[in-house]
């Protein structure tokens, strides 16, 4: 199944859900959960066929929820709905599966009770297989892009060509630690990873990298986001692009000091620049005293770059033109700390 077919199948899933799950975000979550459910069963089957190993995901009391049993013709529509709804709500209690998967299912539930719609939806999901995870990862990013341009917390989707342009300009390297402190669906991190792989390719993708370098490479990426839903989606997105255990954290970079002492070679971000009424209440370790998120995020990134580090940040024009004290202090800091370029984008 190629990328276009994968994309079409994701569209079909949305078409089934659109009448019963109106919110695009909720549709994405339902497709994400169902895909991971199916992949867990695929991985159990692969372990059994290739290594004669017992199932890991659907074992013990969770064996009754396996995808194969769920889609058995002997299971009626209502029974299937009851099994699936129960499974996704209990899966985060499954101690036999990796932490990443428990995180994905944390708080998951089925928001509708239409057995026929669920049957159609699961039949569509059944057409996906884990062996095409790269194509699926790209299609999943496409799915995330339709969630809307702006969220309640001022989160903007960054167009792929803008992400790739910034990553190319910053030029991350295979031995550098890379962070996005407002990672959303992990678009910047995935673009940076692909950039490094392409830069280390002769004939086959990443063939210049040794197996050891590839293992180290995927440990060099980390991201934070304030939204638990975005943390879940970014983990899945990275997993589908070959990251077995993505290091994405639910973390408020502006008000928490827990990770303040971490530093990075490369930082890439399109942070949320919508300050709540009354402003942000940051902790006291910022160089620039401010209560506007655009000032604080840029300051945060500067504070967490290593001495020869580089950053690519999307900022509102106010950072360049506003005359308030905090903006002036930030511009002074930027210029003295090695600002290289400002690229103005069309509206």
Image: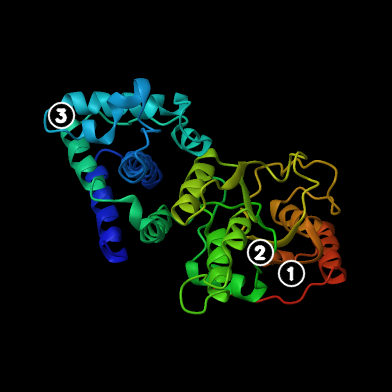
Classed neighbour count for the residue bearing mark 2: other residues with Cα under 10 Å, few (<14), some (14–19), many (≥20): some
Helix or strand or loop: what does disc 1 sit on?
Answer: helix
Helix or strand or loop: what does disc 2 sit on?
Answer: loop
Q: Position of residue 300 (x, y in %)?
A: 76, 53
The mark nearer the N terminus, 3 or 2, is 3
Q: How far apart are marks 3 and 1 (CA)?
A: 59 Å
Q: Distance between the residues labelled 2 and 1?
A: 9 Å
Mark drawn on residue 315: 2
Relative depth, front residue between 305 and 93: 93
Quick check: marks 2 and 1 in contact, CB under 8 Å?
A: yes
Q: Quadrant of the C terminus?
A: bottom right
- Which residue shows up at 66% across the image and 52% down it? 181
Report the residue that reaches farthest toward the top.
61
Q: Give the quadrant of residue 299.
A: bottom right
- Which residue shows up at 70% across the image and 45% down it? 253
Q: Position of residue 255 (x, y in %)?
A: 74, 40
Q: Give the quadrant of residue 179.
A: bottom right
For mark 1, what is the residue?
A: 320
Q: How many marks?
A: 3
- Which residue shows up at 51% across the image and 79% down it? 202
For mark 3, what is the residue?
A: 77
């Amino acid at each position: 199944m190629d990328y276009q077919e994968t994309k079409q199948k994701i569209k079909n899933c949305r078409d089934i859900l659109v009448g019963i799950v109106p919110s695009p975000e909720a549709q994405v979550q339902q497709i994400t959960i169902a895909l991971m459910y199916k992949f867990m069963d695929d991985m159990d089957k692969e372990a059994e066929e290739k290594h004669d190993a017992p199932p890991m995901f659907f074992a013990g009391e969770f064996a009754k929820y396996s995808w194969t049993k769920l889609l058995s013709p002997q299971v009626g529509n209502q029974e299937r709905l009851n099994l699936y709804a129960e499974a996704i709500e209990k899966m985060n209690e499954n101690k036999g599966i990796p932490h990443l998967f428990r995180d994905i299912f944390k708080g998951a539930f089925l928001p509708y009770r239409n057995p026929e719609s669920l049957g159609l939806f699961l039949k569509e999901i059944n057409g996906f297989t884990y062996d095409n995870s790269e194509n699926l990862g790209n299609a999943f990013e496409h799915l995330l892009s339709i969630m809307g341009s702006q969220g309640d917390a001022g989160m903007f989707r960054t167009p792929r060509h803008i992400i790739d342009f910034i990553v190319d300009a910053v030029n991350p390297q295979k031995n550098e630690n890379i962070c996005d402190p407002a990672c959303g669906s992990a678009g910047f991190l995935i673009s940076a990873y692909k950039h490094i792989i392409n830069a280390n390719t002769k004939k086959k993708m990443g063939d210049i990298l040794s197996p050891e370098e590839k293992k180290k490479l995927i440990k060099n990426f980390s991201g934070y986001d304030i939204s638990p839903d975005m943390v879940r989606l970014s983990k899945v997105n990275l997993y589908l692009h070959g990251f077995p255990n993505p290091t994405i954290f639910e973390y408020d970079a502006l008000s928490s000091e827990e990770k303040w002492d971490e530093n990075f070679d490369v930082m890439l971000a399109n942070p949320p620049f919508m300050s709540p009424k009354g402003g942000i209440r940051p902790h006291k370790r910022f160089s620039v005293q401010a209560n506007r998120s655009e000032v604080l995020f840029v300051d945060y990134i500067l504070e967490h770059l290593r001495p020869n580090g580089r950053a690519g940040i999307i900022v509102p024009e106010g950072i360049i033109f506003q005359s308030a004290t905090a903006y002036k202090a930030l511009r002074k800091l930027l210029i003295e700390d090695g600002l290289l370029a400002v690229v103005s984008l069309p509206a």
